[in-house]
Image (cartoon, rainbow, N blue to C red):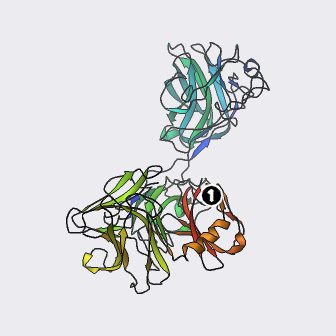
Amino acid sequence: MKLNLFFGVANIAALFCTSILSAQNFQTMPVQSGYTADVIANGVGSSSISTSTDVDGVSFAFVARGFQATATNTPITYGIPSDGIINSAVASTPGLSFQLADLSANNSLRLSTIGQSGTLNFTTPKPAFKLYMLSTSGSGASSVDIVVNFTDGTSQTFSNQAVSDWYYGANFAIQGIGRINRGNDVLESSTTEPRLYQAVLNIDAANQTKPIQNVTITKVGTGTGISNIFAFSADVYSDCVAPTLQPVASITSSSAQVSWTANSATAVSYDIYYSTTNTAPAMGAAATISGVVGTSRVLDNLNANTNYYYWVRSNCSPGTSQSSWSFSGTFKTACGAVSSLFENFESYNTGSIVPTCWNRIAGTGSQTITATSPASGIRNIYQYTLASATPTYVVLPEFSNISSGGNQLRFKARVSSGAPGSLIVGYVTNATDASTFVALQTLSIANTSYASNSEYTVQVPSSVPFGARLAIRSANDGKSYYWDDIYWEASQLATSEVNANKKKLAIHPNPFKDVLYISEIDKVTSVTINDVTGRTVRTIDNPSKEIDLRFLNSGLYLVTLKFKDGSQLTTKAIKQ
């Protein structure tokens, strides 16, 4: 856990970032015929049986995941993916993948001697902006000439294309796939070797509308390596092209304006897909907003202080053609009022900083987020050191229910030395003006470590004006204070009453994957799930003992259980 000290930084403005590129339309190019060798051991049985030859001329072949030399051997967990799908690791082509041929049949165009050639015929000819080749070379690097043949009888030649040795080369699509000796079935595993490489062939503009029928590959040069060609994929040509995203504007706590520039003369409308995760939508995924006319749109009803990711695609005429999705853009909504809060400062690096949506009214003291070692583990804390008689105020985020009564501020605190010390909890009506501070309660901080007496609670009355913000300052005592695990929550009943419920109730498993189970559910009237920013992500009235939370992203959440006797219990739960 991290403990943070919060006398600090001004409210962090909303951030934004956006792509300035157009997305590629990556598609695999399945091969109908032309492979000459099976160089991937797979299944159960000796590699000399499940392959026809080696990769390198000296008995070594690739091996597939799950391979077993005999039925009693443990299946291996490394190797070529058993489904033959290679998701490229090359950073410049996110989303590009290759489909290998049947691992139990010929799956490589293997070229061992100078002048040897072969032709790979594609099952479905497709026009392309770029063609991507998946290959490797055994026993040294090699070179090949590649002739791309189009369905109209024309061709484009790429001469002397280098193919890296299967060990240590750059621009690899996959690495660490291991190999096997066909002579004795001895396996060699590695996290980095051997490798398959990705090469790009840029199709001339005059040829980009022509479907590619096949490719003819010839081994050339003086290299001694054996060329192995495994698969092709393409950035498929279309005159309906994804737009280019522009910077996000007019960001508020609940909305943002996204815009783009058209890249297709035939685009008549656009679709927008947005999410709080950065997982790109599939090619045919349903849009969040469809049929947008023009090149901008306000996204509204968003959550405050939240990262969003978005994609845009073109709808073109004539017909119903549709582009791929653009590269993603991202922005973060501004801070807004929340009804609950948990902050443990774990998401911040150490150093002088104010957490997002907090504020600092600076005096002459120093404040920083600091790593410290409590009774167990390393925690980040917020530290306050008074350098003179001018204090610094830490202003908490805005709470929408600050005037409703029945709420409390709860946090852990300690003093550096010279106990006891004092922290004053109050509120400000102007988050940038210390003179508006009104004290609610002075806390005597007697503990110098995070022990059982380190948690403090302040009940916040309904007399606090709407729009005010809670604030904490130290007394003018020259001491350093540390605090952590800050909650804004509904006031709890007496500790004995809450503990009585807690003893009978368990939340499990923790961490959980998809479903959270609650025992003694007959005593619970509602369950509320909040993220660490205080945003409510789900409320369930009259819950069953099984709470389905598979829709949540991985991370830390606060689970608040309300009981029939009026008490409530808040506990932490981690989604894997």
Please tell me whether residue 255 is drawn above or below residue 135 in the rendered image. below
Q: Position of residue 152 (x, y in %)?
A: 61, 36
Q: Which residue is mark 1?
A: 285
Q: Position of residue 203 (x, y in %)?
A: 51, 37
Residue type at mark 1 is Ala
Q: Position of residue 56 (x, y in %)?
A: 60, 16
For this rendering, which residue is in front, 264 or 394? 394
Asked if one can make out residue 539 in the rendered structure from this viewpoint, the answer is no
Which residue is found at the position 51% from the left and 77% from the top? Answer: 491
Q: Quick one: which residue is furthest to the right in this view?
A: 71
Please tell me whether residue 528 is drawn above or below residue 184 in the rendered image. below
Asked if one can make out residue 486 in the rendered structure from this viewpoint, the answer is yes
- Give the quarter of the image for residue 530: bottom right
Q: Is residue 123 left or right of residue 460?
A: right
Please tell me whether residue 377 is drawn above or below residue 305 in the rendered image. above
Element class at badge 1: loop
Q: Is residue 352 left or right of residue 283?
A: left
Would you call the spot at circle 1 few (<14 residues within 10 Å), some (14-19), or many (20 or more)?
A: few
For this rendering, which residue is in front, 100 or 160? 100
Which residue is found at the position 67% from the left and 18% from the top? Answer: 186
**Number of numbered labels in the structure image:** 1
Please tell me whether residue 59 is drawn above or below residue 377 in the rendered image. above
Q: Quick one: which residue is furthest to the left in this view?
A: 388
For this rendering, which residue is in front, 305 or 433? 433
For this rendering, which residue is in front, 85 or 289? 85
Q: Position of residue 398 (x, y in %)?
A: 41, 74
- Give the quarter of the image for residue 568: bottom right
